[in-house]
Amino acid sequence: MLVIESWVISDDNPVPVSSGMVLEVLQSRIDSGQLETWLISSSGRSLAFVTNTERAMVMLLEDEGDPGEHAVDLGAEGASGGFGLSNAQDDMYPNEDTVPIREAFRLVGHIVATGAWPMDARRVVDR
């Protein structure tokens, strides 16, 4: 049984973000320098999107203590920095643990719309 969740941006007002609007919201936040976005679902799950504007880390967590799962770009070489967190920390990640931003947008849009990763999404379960 598919249960559709509603999602809100964790640091904004509690108005649900629709799947049709989530990409516009993410782009607006990026344009204003907010490179880290956490979405919280009505069932208590969290969806993290952290970007350096070229690549993004996308993580889905079932609850607060869950190590979760994250999107990967298997075979990508090197590492990228510039992943700005809300606590002013600037992270660097292996490119294999991030995806190109267009793919990240696709993944987030699908998760917000359906509650699940796309069938073709490459991800690693960190549990």
Image (cartoon, rainbow, N blue to C red):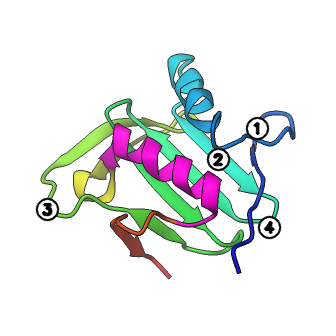
Q: Is residue 95 above or below residue 23?
A: below
- Mark 2 or 1 closer to N-term? 1
> Which one is earlier in the sequence, the residue at label 4 or at label 3?
4
Rate crowding at label 3 as few (under 14), some (14 to 19) or many (20 or more) other CA atoms within 10 Å: few
SS at mark 4? loop
Q: Which mark is residue 38?
A: 2
From this view, report whether residue 22 is shown above or below residue 114: above
Numbered tag placed on residue 43 in the rendering = 4
CA neighbours of label 2 inside 10 A, class few (<14), some (14 to 19), many (20+): some
- In which quadrant of the rendered view does residue 20 lie? top right
Cα distance, mark 3 to mark 1? 34 Å
Q: Are the residues tagged 2 and 1 within 8 Å (C-beta)? A: yes
| Mark 4: amino acid | Ser
Residue 75: mark in rendering? 3
Q: Depth-wise, is mark 3 or mark 1 nearer the camera? A: 3
Mark positioned earlier in the residue sequence (1 or 4): 1
Cβ atoms under marks 4 and 2 closer than 8 Å? no
Q: Residue at x 56, y 63 (%)?
A: 60
> Which residue is outermost to the right?
14
- The Cα–Cα distance between marks 2 and 3, rounded to whole angstroms, is 27 Å
| Percent x, y of residue 118 | 45, 63
Q: Which of marks 4 and 2 is nearer the N terminus?
A: 2
Q: Is mark 3 on a helix, strand or loop?
A: loop
* Residue 110 included in the magenta stretch of the image: yes
Q: In the image, which disc is placed on residue 11?
A: 1
- What segment is highlighted magenta in the picture? 99-116
